[in-house]
Image: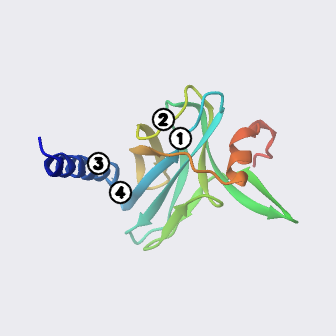
Amino acid sequence: MGVFRQAALAAALAFAVTGAWAKDFTAGDIVIKKPWSRATVQGMANGVSYFELHNHGDEDDRLVDVASPVSGKAELHTHEKDGDVMRMRQVPHIEVPAQGQAVLEPGGYHVMLMKLHEPLEQDSSFPLTLTFEHAGEVTVDVHVERMMKSRAEHDHDDHDHDEHDHH
């Protein structure tokens, strides 16, 4: 097989794999886009997951629960500034306004995966079940991307989340 043919085959395979990770998921009027997580290493107890929620309906909705078989516990969290310190805390839900969106991203809302059963490996995926107040339940495939962490994210993943104030 020639070098050009090998490169073309590799590009086609990369496109097919990337396309598989780019799938959107739907629950009622809610479209879930780009679910992803960062890879973890052996010994890391916690991981995080992010995605976009787009509400195409005329009624506000809320993400009220999350669950995954890769962790002992999954919670909705946010970051808040407390003086000069960023703190993380659990939230009871995430609002998804009618004809609007909510974005779960580093430094903001996110899904905290606590007590991971095994490391999240780069280029793998895992199921994450999202439960909405009105749209119901949907399971999405979360793509695990390479580990590329800022110091703040690293510190966030390595401390014990049982110490957070839970409301």
User: Which residue corresponds to the image point at 42% horizontal and 74% vertical from the top-left?
Assistant: 99
Callouts 1 and 2 close, C-beta under 8 Å: yes
Task: Kindly identify the amino acid type of the residue bearing the numbered disc 2.
Answer: Glu
Residue at mark 1 to residue at mark 2: CA–CA distance: 5 Å
Q: Who is closer to the viewer here, 50 or 65?
A: 50
Give the spatial CA distance, label 2 vs label 4: 31 Å
Q: Are marks 2 and 4 in contact (CB under 8 Å)?
A: no
- 118 over 20 or under it: above or below: above
Residue pointed to by mark 1: 39
Real-space Cα distance between discs 3 and 2? 17 Å
In this view, the residue in front, 63 or 116, is: 116
On residue 93, the disc is none
What residue did someone put label 2 on?
Answer: 121
Please tell me whether mark 4 sits on a helix, a strand or a loop: loop
Name the residue tied to disc 4. Answer: 28
> What residue appears at the point 53 percent right and 43 percent down from the top-left corner?
66
Front label number (2 vs 4) = 2
